[in-house]
Image: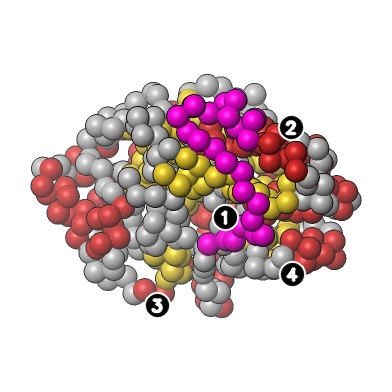
Amino acid sequence: MSLRRLSPREYLVNLAGVVVSMPVYSHREWAQRPDLDAFALRRARDMAVWAEAKVPIYRELYGKAGVQPNDIRTLDDFRRLPLMDKDAVRAGYPARSVAEGIDLRRCLLSTSSGSSGRMMTVPHLADRFWPYLISGQRMLRWATADHYPFWYRQAYVYTSEYPLLRVPGLYPMKFIPTAADPERVLEALEALRPHILHTYPTVLRDLVALSPTRMSALHLRGASVGSELSTQSERDTWAEILGVRVCDEYSTEELGRVASQCPQGSYHLHEDVVLTEIVDEQGRTTCEVGEVVGTELHNHAMPFVRYRQGDLARISDQACSCGRHTRLLTDLVGRRNDGFLLRDETHLSAGFLLDVSYRAILGLAEDMVSAYRFVQKNPDSAVFEVVAGTAWDERSAVLIKAALASELPPALAVSVSLVPEISRSAGGKRSTVVRDFAQ
């Protein structure tokens, strides 16, 4: 995501939106299930009505399906709307995907990193950005165990700066670019002494590998990672080093913040930001692992209504001990097109491969591995790329290969290769699991 700065007028409008709406959103965080459903249905219906009236690709989609968003009365009615996919939205940009009458000069233009292989630009009305600011504050508050006083300093280590509202003395934030090498990032953190760290999992992995002692000495009050897959086991290890829970969040360029881990570690859906569904391969609602479909409830510049996100997950109605009543996102295993695909059509999810990789590294002595990436070169073989740590020796590759082979199908030949570095994409992300061949 790369966003321009807010103008003075946009800043003031968003500041007013945050001040007025923050108490409402804070109250809704603890609302009962029927109230949450009623709010999400009302906003989703309104967005579908707006999309049909203002956005050509939705007007044509609903016309062909013979459905009228105005007729929606229940969530079951809403689920009868046809699904929208990435290719249609991307191909229609801007003339057919952006709402008619929207001036893109009044928008913040957010561009995805292209994890699905192609970039996408998503405009947001710049003076209506406050819902995302509120959901961001909620995410960081959960990462600090529901204790996020206004004087806490945040270190935001990402690709580009986020257009936060900066009021002197209130929730101060320091942007540190990921373009810097880990040593320079750590030096910046030591100079800032932040209370909260928010960054990519791969950045935190690099920092901890560089110096667990220096990272521990930061005495953080909270840490949050996102935008890339990470495993709970790895986050638990980082938490032991940092002395605080490391919370994950799931967000996308199109839908915004979908879910965040609460202080108890559950992924709560932000149901006042996105109405989230899970569908099977036929597009039917399912209680099993399926594709994430979302309706963003605030972006009138470029609506996303029943939008196929491409990620795989499950939704649970299980109660969380934190007391919130929002549904939980479980079994988040990555993108449908991520992971390894073997010759016999066996699919190994990115989440499973991350767990396998982490267990292989965990079995080594400290400081053997500085960074790693698992790359499938063809249906029969994969390479585990390693940036050697200070303790690397000739036994390390043998141990890694044996650990990987013990958990992976015999049909997949695995080798270990030393590389000087593992670079990031233009969007700042660094995928840990990569399928590097055409299907």
Of the numbered discs 2 and 4, the one sitting upstream in the chain is 4
Task: Give amino acid for label 2.
Answer: Gly
The one nearer the camera, 73 or 329, is: 329
Disc 4 on helix, strand or loop? Answer: loop
Residue at the image point whose x is 61% and y is 43% from the top: 416
Q: Which residues are magenta?
A: 401-425
Disc 1 on helix, strand or loop? Answer: loop
Of the numbered discs 4 and 3, the one sitting upstream in the chain is 3
Whole-percent x, y for residue 218 in the image: 85, 53
The one nearer the camera, 14 or 143, is: 143
Determine whether, in the image, residue 120 is placed left or right of residue 316: left
| Mark 3, other Cα within 10 Å: few <14 / some 14–19 / many ≥20 | few
Mark 2 sits on what residue? 363
Residue at the image point whose x is 53% and y is 28% from the top: 408
Residue at the image point whose x is 53% and y is 62% from the top: 425
Above or below — where is 183 with respect to 408?
below
Residue at the image point whose x is 73% and y is 46% from the top: 369
Mark 3 sits on what residue? 105
Quadrant for the C terminus, please: top left
How far apart marks 1 and 3 lie (CA) works out to: 31 Å
Whole-percent x, y for residue 241 in the image: 82, 41
Mark 4 sits on what residue? 168
Disc 2 on helix, strand or loop? Answer: loop
Q: In the rendered structure, are the residues bearing label 2 and label 4 in contact, judged by CB atoms less than 8 Å apart?
A: no
Most distant residue in the top direction: 318
Inspect this view and state whether residue 263 appears.
no
How far apart marks 4 and 1 lie (CA) works out to: 34 Å
Question: Residue 270 colored magenta?
Answer: no
How far apart marks 4 and 3 lie (CA) works out to: 28 Å
Above or below — where is 58 with respect to 83?
below
Mark 1 sits on what residue? 430
